[in-house]
Image (cartoon, grey):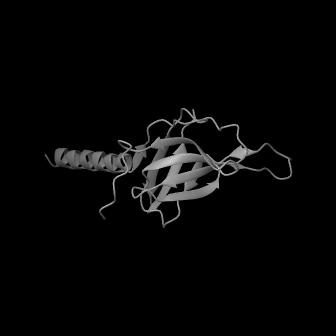
Amino acid sequence: MVRRMIGTALLTMTALLLTVSVAGAQTSRPFSGAKVNGGTVTMAVKDGKTTLTLSDDFKVPDTPDPHWQVVDARGNVYLLQRLGVKSLGGLAKDRVSMMITLPAYIKDVASVQIYCAWAEAVLGEAPFGNGKREPNTK
């Protein structure tokens, strides 16, 4: 009887922990735009820090200066770091920044954009949820 209760309690706690970890991650709808079509972004919160991660099927656009850009629920736009990271003096291949940790001042994310800073144009956008940018009531 006691073993059964302990087993049930452990199973319940495990299910609760799995639910919390899954609830902390959200995947966007696919990117769509002039140069970026396909791939998604996963947003996860761990230890109070929000990270965005591009999916494996995301293709970096062939443009001069693509950047991460985030739009919050109020419509504020935040231009963040460059998508590509240059290697050391050409000794190694350039790499792509597939994950970014958001600064603390960004409180929510309605969509993620890939933005070309050279052309000053949005190359593609991946909205979260239903894609509507509703004001944050918090």
The quarter of the image holding the N terminus is top left
Q: Position of residue 36 (x, y in %)?
A: 58, 36
- Total labels: the figure holds 0
Q: Residue furthest left?
A: 1
Q: Residue furthest bottom?
A: 105
Dividing the picture into quadrants, the one containing residue 28 is: top left
Which residue is located at x 66 percent, y 37 percent? Answer: 61
Which residue is located at x 86 percent, y 47 percent? Answer: 91
Is the residue 69 above or below the residue 55 in the image? Answer: below
**Between residues 87 and 71, which one lies in front from this camera angle?**
71
Lateral position of residue 75 relative to residue 85, left or right: left
Dividing the picture into quadrants, the one containing residue 63 is: top right
Is the residue 23 above or below the residue 34 in the image? Answer: below
**Between residues 42 and 79, which one lies in front from this camera angle?**
79
Lateral position of residue 6 relative to residue 84, left or right: left
Q: Position of residue 68 (x, y in %)?
A: 59, 51
Lateral position of residue 108 relative to residue 123, left or right: left
Is the residue 46 above or below the residue 28 in the image? Answer: below
**Between residues 26 and 62, which one lies in front from this camera angle?**
62
The quarter of the image holding the C terminus is bottom left
Lateral position of residue 26 relative to residue 120, left or right: left
Which residue is located at x 48 percent, y 35 percent? Answer: 30
Q: Position of residue 104 (x, y in %)?
A: 49, 66
